[in-house]
């Protein structure tokens, strides 16, 4: 206390805060990195190929991103609580085959609701096992993944259901502006990102989700009902997975029990590249949207450049490691 | 009974099977004082604190808060009555900023539809509140927008103290608040404890650090074998005498 700096007054504390402003919140360091990577990739592919930077191709990139990108939004919520969801792709696939099967009777709206119910029941299962029984999310969702992968094939007898309903494939359509289609699926993806982003950054629920992922003991000491927050996260993620199932039926109008077998890991990749910490408490859905776009841009751009698509996996892998390294640096910078 | 006693306990008893954790224990905390609670490991200090904060329900005995009998059934009951606790382990979320930590679990929503329908937080009001609270307690940070992981250990504990002091309306309890801190940071937290007292809240300080206790406490509750064996003042009792009584080497009657 000998070389004490001048005492900060209330006014000074607030003034410093005001200088930061809302833009800093939106472009916080955790989103700025992924955004810079996305812009860099777009610039490089635009400069090196003729076919990358045209509206049709950019629209295609967005459409190719929606299914994994939507799954990744739910995954983000789970990872923010320091959890992980290996079952999200399998939940989506089971929901889509249930929808495909029930839709053969013609009641497409009821079928879609049944798909939502499937997601909610499985989200509840994951959530109860993780929150009430305090089981590790990795193991819980690995088990659920294994069961559901088999369940989807048993349910369909390993057959696929063709989707003929316009309603169920509606998300693949959308208005066209100057030859470029913005699909409802892309709009829904962006809309879900906006809603979840609002909930995470502007509501008490969001602050509590971050707190539970960051330091569950401290959260509990302040009176936050940690188990209830965890359960709410798994249920909210389940609703998002139901939207992903609807997106998937639009992308490929077939409910295939063996489809999307790597979507769980792809969604984790998008979350991590998007700057969300696997240790919980840091990150957000806007970063995840950017992360999902980065993965698709790499695949698309390398293909346009005539480079073997295996290098896309190499590039994605390198980005994942960089993202984790940056997160490690951020988390340990002050723990000297 | 003197009216300036804020928190009082008489004859608290708690058994765990054959183990007697509290044995007809008394406790008195006056308004405007820092009361230190010292005792050897296993003397039952933490059971006493848990009984006072609702985490443990005593088998028998009475607790009164500002003269009114209270029967806490849970930690939440005690908090509703205005008793807040700072724990040894840093009870902060490092990825959140100072304001979010101060308001954690007690977030304020905007007025009107934005608050009731859209559940929107009133961040401006919370930032003002936390700036006021940090300034009131003289805690030095660059900005209340700083994430807690950019703060030193002493500053982090200061944030935990600031939160508790902001919400406590009758008593602040600090359970080994400096055990994880270095000398300089410990001093910062001790000044903060005095500041909390100056701002009008009585403080119960549980500590193993005798020099710290003698530095800030107004009175010292010596706990041994599940009960208050002596209640002394640091001016009239030396550390050596108190430790001797605390460990059973000396009878409490030997104290002046």
Image (cartoon, grey):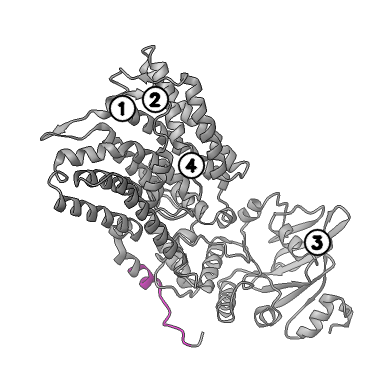
Real-space CA distance between mark 2 and mark 1, rounded to the nearest whole angstrom: 9 Å
Kind of element beneath mark 1: loop
Viewer-nearest of discs 3 and 4: 4
Dot 1 corresponds to which residue?
A: A252
Host chain of mark 3? B
Badge 4: chain ID: A
Q: Residue furthest top?
A: A105
Give the residue number, with chain letter if any, for mark 4.
A85
* Residue indicated by mark 3: B10
Of A48 and A264, the residue lying toward us: A48
Q: Are marks 3 and 4 on the same chain?
A: no
Residue at image coords 51%, 21%: A154
Confirm whether the magenta stretch covers residue A322. no
Q: Looking at the picture, do discs 4 and 2 lie on one chain?
A: yes
Label of residue A256 in the image: 2
Can I make out residue B237 in this image?
no
The numbered dot on residue A221 is none
* Real-space CA distance between mark 1 and mark 4, rounded to the nearest whole angstrom: 24 Å
Q: Position of residue A231 (x, y in %)?
A: 53, 40
Helix, strand or loop at mark 2: loop
Q: Are marks 2 and 1 on the same chain?
A: yes
Label located before the other in sequence (1 or 4) = 4
**Direction from residue A99 to residue A185 in the image, left or right:** left
Q: Secondary structure at mark 3?
A: strand
For residue B239, what is the image quadrant?
A: bottom right
Q: Are marks 2 and 1 in contact (CB under 8 Å)?
A: yes
Q: Are marks 1 and 4 in contact (CB under 8 Å)?
A: no
Image depth: mark 2 or mark 3 in front: 2
Select label 1 or label 3 by which is in front: 1
């Amino acid at each position: 206390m000998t070389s004490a700096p001048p005492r900060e007054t209330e006014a000074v504390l607030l003034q410093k805060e005001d200088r930061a402003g809302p833009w800093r919140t939106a472009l916080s360091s955790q989103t700025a990195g992924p955004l810079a990577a996305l812009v860099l990739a777009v610039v490089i592919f635009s400069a090196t190929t003729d076919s990358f930077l045209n509206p049709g191709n950019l629209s295609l990139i967005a459409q190719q991103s929606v299914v994994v990108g939507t799954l990744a939004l739910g995954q983000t919520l789970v990872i923010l609580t320091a959890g992980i969801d290996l079952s999200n792709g399998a939940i989506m696939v089971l929901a889509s085959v249930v929808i495909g099967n029930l839709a053969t009777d013609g009641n497409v709206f009821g079928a879609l609701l049944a798909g939502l119910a499937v997601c909610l029941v499985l989200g509840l299962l994951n959530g109860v096992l993780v929150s009430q029984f305090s089981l590790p999310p990795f193991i819980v969702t690995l088990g659920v993944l294994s069961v559901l992968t088999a369940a989807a094939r048993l349910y369909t007898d390993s057959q696929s259901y063709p989707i003929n309903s316009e309603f169920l494939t509606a998300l693949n359509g959308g208005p066209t502006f100057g030859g470029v289609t913005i699909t409802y699926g892309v709009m829904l993806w962006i809309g879900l990102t906006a809603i979840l982003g609002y909930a995470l950054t502007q509501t008490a629920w969001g602050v509590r989700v971050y707190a539970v992922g960051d330091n569950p003991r401290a959260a509990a000491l302040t009176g936050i009902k940690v188990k209830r927050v965890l359960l709410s996260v798994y249920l909210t993620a389940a609703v998002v997975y139901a939207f992903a199932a609807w997106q998937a039926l639009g992308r490929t109008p077939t409910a295939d029990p063996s489809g999307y077998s790597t979507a769980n890991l792809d969604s984790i990749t998008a979350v991590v590249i998007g700057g969300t910490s696997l240790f919980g408490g840091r990150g957000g859905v806007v970063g995840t949207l950017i992360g999902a776009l980065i993965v698709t841009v790499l695949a698309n751009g390398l293909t346009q450049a005539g480079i073997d698509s295996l290098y896309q996996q190499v590039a994605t892998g390198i980005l994942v490691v960089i993202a984790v390294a940056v997160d490690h640096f951020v988390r340990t910078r002050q723990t000297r | 009974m003197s009216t300036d006693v804020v928190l009082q306990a008489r004859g608290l008893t708690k058994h765990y099977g054959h183990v007697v954790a509290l044995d007809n224990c008394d406790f008195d905390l006056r308004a405007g004082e820092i009361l230190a609670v010292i005792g050897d490991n296993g003397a039952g200090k933490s059971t006493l604190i848990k009984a006072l904060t609702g985490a443990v329900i005593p088998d028998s005995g009475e607790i009164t808060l500002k003269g009114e009998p209270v029967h806490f059934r849970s930690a939440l009951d005690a908090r509703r009555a205005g008793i807040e606790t700072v724990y040894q382990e840093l009870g902060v979320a490092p990825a959140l900023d100072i304001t979010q930590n101060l308001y954690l679990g007690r977030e304020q929503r905007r007025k009107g539809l934005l608050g009731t329908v859209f559940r929107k937080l009133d961040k401006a009001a919370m930032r003002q509140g936390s700036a006021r609270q940090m300034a009131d307690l003289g805690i030095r940070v660059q900005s209340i927008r700083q994430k807690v992981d950019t703060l030193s250990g002493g500053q982090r504990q200061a944030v935990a103290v600031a939160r508790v002091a902001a919400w406590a309306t009758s008593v602040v309890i600090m359970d080994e608040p400096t055990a994880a801190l270095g000398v300089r940071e410990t001093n910062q937290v001790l000044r903060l404890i005095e500041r909390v007292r100056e701002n009008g809240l009585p403080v119960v300080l549980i500590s193993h650090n005798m020099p710290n206790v003698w530095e800030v406490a107004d009175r010292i509750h010596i706990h041994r074998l599940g009960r208050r064996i002596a209640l002394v003042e640091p001016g009239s009792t030396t550390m050596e005498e108190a430790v001797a009584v605390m460990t059973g080497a000396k009878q409490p009657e030997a104290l002046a």
